[in-house]
Image: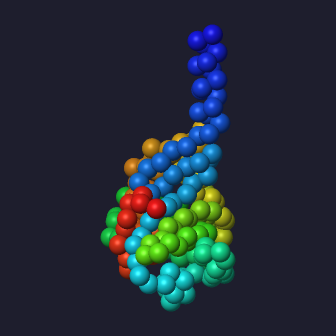
């Protein structure tokens, strides 16, 4: 009986694989980045004025947009410190922003790297989802992602919405 209970619990854990690190989390193999900010400014103006977003839609207090393909700012990191898929690609993603009085929550998903040049391993324009590089088969994060790429991408994503104060997880 004890083995049956252990087996059932293990199956439930595998079925709802969920892993989190910094502002990234993985839910059933899909990677999301989420952060909460405090501000008195109009968030839609932030997106429009940046010029980095397209297809901006506001519906029921949720703003959604597509980030235009752009190279990731490496912030002075040496080429050997940056994974090739970040260094040689442009990044694009989908963003949803939920607003409450004085704060908003940014959720990024559907992160895709677009190869910026031809190499022996890939062709210019080839698209690869972040999940390929970031997650294992069980949905948890790969150590190589946590040790390098997560910090680089977290800095980049945080800087897109930086004219505000962060609030941790206080939603």
Q: In this view, does 54 lie above or below 150?
A: below
The furthest residue to the front: 101
The furthest residue to the top: 1
Q: Could one spot residue 132 in this view of the protein? A: no
Q: Position of residue 5 (x, y in %)?
A: 61, 18
Image quarter of residue 32: bottom right
**Toward the viewer: 106 or 62?**
62
Q: In this view, does 138 lie to the left or right of 143?
A: right
Q: In this view, does 22 lie above or below 157?
A: above
Task: Give the residue displayed 64% in from the left and 28% down from the top.
Answer: 11
Task: Give the residue displayed 59% in from the left and 26% down from the top.
Answer: 10
Q: Position of residue 90 (x, y in %)?
A: 55, 71
**Toward the viewer: 76 or 64?**
64
Quadrant of the snapshot with the N terminus: top right
Q: In this view, does 19 lie to the left or right of 30?
A: left
Q: Where is residue 31 in the image (x, y as percent from the top left)?
A: 57, 54
**Toward the viewer: 20 or 84?**
20
Q: Could one spot residue 8 in this view of the protein? A: yes
Image quarter of residue 125: bottom right
Q: In this view, does 103 lie to the left or right of 64?
A: left
Task: Give the residue displayed 39% in from the left and 50% down from the top.
Answer: 147
The furthest residue to the bottom: 49
Q: How many tags in the picture?
A: 0
Image quarter of residue 94: bottom right
Task: Give the residue displayed 55% in from the left and 43% down from the top.
Answer: 18
Q: Position of residue 133 (x, y in %)?
A: 55, 52
- Colour treatment of the image: rainbow
């Amino acid at each position: 009986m004890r083995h049956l209970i252990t087996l059932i619990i293990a199956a439930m854990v595998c079925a709802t694989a969920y892993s989190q690190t910094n502002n990234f989390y993985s839910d059933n193999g899909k990677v999301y980045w989420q952060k909460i900010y405090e501000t008195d400014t109009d968030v839609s103006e932030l997106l429009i004025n940046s010029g980095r977003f397209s297809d901006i839609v506001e519906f029921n207090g949720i703003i959604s947009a597509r980030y235009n393909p752009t190279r990731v700012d490496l912030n002075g990191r040496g080429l050997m410190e940056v994974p090739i898929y970040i260094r040689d690609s442009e990044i694009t993603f989908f963003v949803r922003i939920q607003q409450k009085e004085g704060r908003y929550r940014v959720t990024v998903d559907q992160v895709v790297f677009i190869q910026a040049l031809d190499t022996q391993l890939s062709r210019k324009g080839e698209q690869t989802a972040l999940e390929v590089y970031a997650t294992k088969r069980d949905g948890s994060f790969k150590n190589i992602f946590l040790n390098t790429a997560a910090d680089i991408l977290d800095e980049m994503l945080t800087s897109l919405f930086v004219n505000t104060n962060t609030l941790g997880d206080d939603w």
